[in-house]
Structure formats: C-alpha cells, structure tokens
Amino acid sequence: MFWKKKEIPSHGKTITVQQGVAANALSIQALINVLVNKNVCTRQEIMDELKVITRPVQNDGTKG
C-alpha cells in the first residue's frame, strides 16, 4: 500500500529556489537580448506578447 521513495543520486549541486528563479530570469533576459540584437523583434513586441499571454482567462475559457 505504501511505497518507499526511490533514492535519486545527486549528480550536481543543489540550488535554492531563489537561485533557480534568478537563473531563469537571467536566461530569459539573455534570450531577449539576442532576439533584439539580431532584429528578430523589439522589446516592445515582447512586452506586448507578455500582456497577451498573461491576460486572465474568462469563464468561457477565452482570453479576456
């Protein structure tokens, strides 16, 4: 009925949640910088897209 958790060997360093969040933010910033520097898009286009994808979902499942 109760299963024993399998031990997962650690192959790297352990990081804190804050370090993970910071690393993620820096990775995203690096990607944005590359896209903007290569004239793939502008920072404003990225901000506009963020606004679109973070809009709350309405009761009928559509974006509001």
Image (spheres, rainbow, N blue to C red):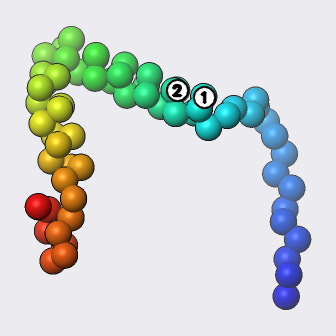
Residue name at image x 59 percent, y 32 percent: 18
Q: Position of residue 28 (x, y in %)?
A: 37, 28
Kind of residue at badge 2: Ala
Outermost residue on the top side: it is: 37
Q: Quadrant of the N terminus?
A: bottom right
Please say if the residues under marks 2 and 1 sit with CB atoms less than 8 Å apart.
Answer: yes
Res 20 quadrant in image: top right
Determine the secondary structure under disc 1: helix
Above or below 8: residue 16: above
Residue name at image x 60 percent, y 28 percent: 19
Q: Quadrant of the C terminus?
A: bottom left
Q: In this orientation, which residue lies closer to the viewer: 16 or 7?
A: 16
Left or right for 39, reference 2: left
The residue carrying mark 1 is: 19
Kind of residue at badge 1: Gln
Residue name at image x 84 percent, y 62 percent: 6
Q: Is residue 40 visible?
A: no
Label 2 neighbour load within 10 Å: few <14, some 14-19, many 20+: few
Q: Position of residue 62 (x, y in %)?
A: 14, 68
The residue carrying mark 2 is: 23
Q: In this orientation, which residue lies closer to the viewer: 35 or 55?
A: 55
Label 1 neighbour load within 10 Å: few <14, some 14-19, many 20+: few
Determine the secondary structure under disc 2: helix
Residue name at image x 15 percent, y 47 percent: 52
Q: How many marks?
A: 2
